[in-house]
Amino acid sequence: ITLWGMELGLLSMRRGELARFLFKPTYAYGTLGCPPLIPPNATVLFEIELIDFLDSAESDKFCALTAEQQEQFPLEKVLKVAATEREFGNYLFRQNRFCDAKVRYKR
């Protein structure tokens, strides 16, 4: 299950930050809840610590370059981009988002 509130909350956080979020049912478990622990239409409190994350900004910049520009990129940075893409693809694969994972692996 992907919770919209958690995804939105994570986007507002920095590495190493600890935050609390109060999510209305629309952004959490909705009308079904998650029995037996979370009843239907429950407002939930999450405490999240963002220990680390994959920053794909450098990968995105690299992929936007022409082939000639990519060839001029330092090997160390190319290896970092490749590792980030692989890790991101693995994350998507674990989420059963196979098509999205395939795109990341091919980049």
Image: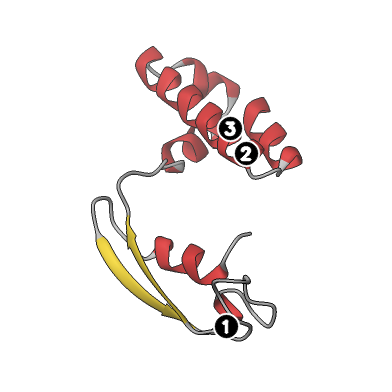
Residue 13 locus on image (x, y percent): 32, 61
Task: Name the secondary structure under disc 2.
Answer: helix
Q: Mark 2 points at which residue?
A: 94
Of circles 2 and 3, the one toward us is 2
Rendered residue at 60%/60% (across/down): 2
Residue 48 locus on image (x, y percent): 34, 61
Give the Cα separation between the discs numbered 1 and 3.
29 Å
At label 2, the amino acid type is Arg
Residue 66 lies left or right of residue 62; in this view the side is right
Up-down: is 18 above or below 56? below
At label 3, the amino acid type is Asn
The dot on residue 90 is: 3
At label 1, the amino acid type is Pro
Residue 4 locus on image (x, y percent): 56, 69
Residue 28 locus on image (x, y percent): 56, 74
Residue 84 visible: yes
Up-down: is 43 above or below 38? below
Give the Cα separation between the discs numbered 1 and 2.
25 Å
Q: Mark 1 points at which residue?
A: 25
Count neighbours of disc 3 (C-alpha within 10 A) and say few if under 14, some if 14 to 19, many if 20 or more. Answer: some
Residue 107 visible: no
The image shows a total of numbered marks equal to: 3
The dot on residue 52 is: none
Of circles 1 and 3, the one toward us is 1
**Snapshot quadrant of residue 93:** top right
Residues 68 and 46: in front is 46
